[in-house]
Amino acid sequence: MSSSSKPNLPVTNAVNGPPNADLVRERGAASFPVRDLTYLVYGGQERTEHLERIANMVASDPVFRKTDRFFLSRTEQYRRSLEKVRHYKELIAKHNLHSELDQQDLRQAIDEDLPIGLHVGMFIPTIVGQGTDEQQKKWLPLARAYKIIGTYAQTELGHGSFIRGLETVATYDKSTQEFVLNSPTLTATKWWPGALGKTSTHCVVFARLVISDRECGVHPFMVQLRSLENHEPLKGITVGDIGPKFAYETMDNGFLRFDHVRIPRDHMLMRFAQVAADGTYSTPPHSKVSYATMVFMRAYIIGTASSTLAKAVTIAVRYSCVRKQFPLRSGEPEQQILNYQNQQAALFPLLATAYAFHFTGNYIRQMYSDFVRGMRAQDFSVLPEMHATSAGLKSLTTWIASAGIETCRASCGGHGYSKLSGLPSLYANYIPACTYEGDNTVMCFQLARYLLKLYGKAQAKPGLRLPGNVSYLEKSTLLDERCDASTEELWLDPARQLHAYRNRALRLVANCANRLVAEMQKGKDEVLAVEAIKSDMVKVAKAHSYYVVLNNFVNAIEQLRASGTSTPILRVLKTLCDLFALHFIQADLGDFLEYGYLSSLHTEPLHAQIRRLLEAIRPDAVALVDAFNFTDHALGSALGVHNGRVYETLFEWAQQEPLNKTQVAPGYHEYIKPFLLAKM
Ligand SMILES: CCCCCCCC/C=C\CCCCCCC/C=C/C(=O)SCCNC(=O)CCNC(=O)[C@H](O)C(C)(C)COP(=O)(O)OP(=O)(O)OC[C@H]1O[C@@H](n2cnc3c(N)ncnc32)[C@H](O)[C@@H]1OP(=O)(O)O
Ligand SMILES: Cc1cc2nc3c(=O)[nH]c(=O)nc-3n(C[C@H](O)[C@H](O)[C@H](O)COP(=O)(O)OP(=O)(O)OC[C@H]3O[C@@H](n4cnc5c(N)ncnc54)[C@H](O)[C@@H]3O)c2cc1C
């Protein structure tokens, strides 16, 4: 079946000419209407077409070109991203893109880590979440109109994960009704905040509040850093860029020190905790409510794991269709490398995962908006579940997406190592997602703690009802159950797949809980007992998060079935869901074998079914990546171009290399010529 209507995307950047014949053939042989899957991914035809209009506008605009990025110095890259920011603002005005959604769509199409990312992603959300109505009235219009540019300054040279260990101090001076911000030590220097170094005029600073020598914990404060006239740092403020990084060159991650900087009392964001003029402190309704922006960003990061992985897979799958190596037998044509089982085994589980994470993103967005609705009504009861779930999913999705990009790069052979493949920079710019907004391992501890607590409660109080995704913790009888998927066919049963993931998660939780008790019985207090099970806690958090991802994928397909989605689409989604489920059992087989949940009776049909699923996906692989509907601009890859003119594009892009500007090598006269022409 061919697609029901043609995509409206231009082929930009690629070398024009007839498209690669193999890709054309693959596209013609898809078993499902590609366009319909695109609509499903992006929320309908209208929304898809809107996104395409914005993507087209960006892709055809020379200011947003990406092809020069590999040849620019760090400073030039930063300047180029500022140029893009200015143009972004111009386009908002020109095309009336004033809604938050339109602006988000535009930024996503520009597809660069712009130095306003923190302004829109954390500075404004913190004012919205933590500011009083008056503070919002004062700061939001300025921020939304970019009359001020802000960032989120929490991490310090000495502490990131341990927020309570932050050293920046905000001491209340009752006599002037001001806070005095100070960095008492070198390690109190704010370090890492994006756009802090050179771009931001303001920031929300997290500092420990001290009132009359009383420590009141870490709170957010609005601080102006630079003059709005000439951008010079204000008195008492030392600010700059933290220097070269693994990548992320467009972002001026910064440092910041305060030397007794005074700010008015109403610059503490006081929606939840307040300091009255006389210094009376009112505690927030929940001790971690000031951490809400991080929860918001973790949810956002989960949502972007799918599209990031999808880009890498699109590049690798298209390239693997174009690339040929070896005939199977002499005299036969060479094979597309995607026909090789090992290539499919590397790429198709990632393709399946990109779709799985799409539904995880939908799930967390829904959970987050329910949580925000509750918070507005002063109901913080969902906060622990929201925090724990998002911490676990952020870790799992960013770990898998990071490793997945590298797998895609390696599967492109030598050309994957070229920056022109787009994969090295995709990887290098993405991997800090495993660290920022909470180091993944540290985040896993949060989810594991939550699960252990609930498990303990369920054990202590049989009959207790736990929330949906953790309700399996109530059922300790599950531990006695074993897998009964003894045929390939049975492995395709979602109930059996979910049973395996639930069983593994419950086993690991129970095992951890037992070990905790055992460590305490050996004489350790709870704190030290937890230290003795920390590696296992990471496994617990991952196991639970895998279950949540699979559960959402299965549920999403059920909902799509109920809402009348066509059979070819349902069939291909189900195949992807099966592969996701079975691949990650295969990847962690030891977990399932260790407790006898599985035996070789089940593993043989499991492996065989995975091989069948790879074969089933093969004819649809190109269509499945096409359905993500990325422009060539978004992919920024010579290997992933839509028309498949990979070699032509690589060759043309390589000509831009500055070394190629002259025929004779720079340095030839000083360094090569002397020994080439030296007398023997
Ligand atoms: C419409 C959509 C628009 C979207 C626009 C978005 C546009 C985005 C554009 C571009 C994107 C830019 C790209 C991203 C750039 C990234 C920028 C990066 C920024 C940062 O990294 S900011 C700094 C982030 N820092 C961290 O994440 C620090 C991690 N540490 C912590 O979170 C915590 O300290 C902790 C969780 C590790 C531990 O906290 P603490 O020591 O204080 O507390 P404990 O004693 O351990 O725990 C006490 C108790 O509280 C619970 N707890 C902890 N945190 C939370 C929370 N956040 N919420 C609820 N509960 C929490 C904890 O579990 C304990 O509970 P129990 O006592 O066990 O019950
Ligand atoms: C690109 C980038 C952008 C950033 N942007 C911002 C920003 O805009 N604003 C901002 O405020 N911050 C920002 N950060 C900082 C970021 O949030 C922190 O780096 C992150 O939270 C991790 O904290 P850390 O660096 O202190 O790591 P550490 O906590 O020092 O982690 C180091 C290691 O120790 C382990 N570890 C830590 N604690 C424990 C424990 N209790 N038990 C066992 N192991 C532990 C970790 O797992 C990790 O392996 C950014 C960072 C990066 C890389």
Image (cartoon, rainbow, N blue to C red):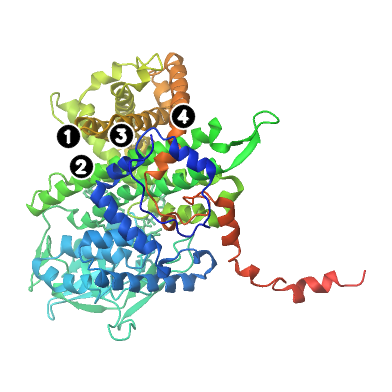
Q: Is tag 4's residue or tag 1's residue first in the polypeptide sequence?
A: 1
Task: Please say if the residues under marks 1 and 2 sit with CB atoms less than 8 Å apart.
Answer: yes
Instruction: From the top left corner, tell me how far across and down residue 524 is, in percent.
Output: 32, 36
Amino acid on which disc 4 is placed: Leu
- Whichever of labels 1 and 3 marks the residue nearer the N terminus, that label is 1
What percent of the width, then of the height, locates residue 340?
A: 56, 32
- Kind of residue at badge 2: Glu
Report which quarter residue 135 is drawn in.
Answer: bottom left
* Residue ID for mark 1: 467
Residue 198 rendering spot, x and y as whole percentages: 38, 75
Q: Residue at x 76, y 76 (%)?
A: 669
Query: What residue is shown with label 2?
Result: 385
Instruction: Between residue 605 and residue 592, name the one nearer to us.
Output: 605
Instruction: Say whether residue 69 is visible.
Output: yes
Q: Is mark 3 within 8 Å of ligand 1?
A: no
Q: Which residue is mark 3?
A: 544
Q: How many neighbours does mark 1 have within 10 angstroms: few (below 14), some (14-19), or many (20 or more)?
A: few
CA gap, disc 4 and disc 3: 26 Å
The disc placed on residue 614 is 4
Disc 4 residue crowd, few under 14, some 14–19, many 20+, Cα 10 Å: many
Q: Is residue 338 above or below residue 180?
A: above
**Upstream in sequence: badge 2 or badge 4:** 2
Question: What kind of residue is marked 3?
Answer: His
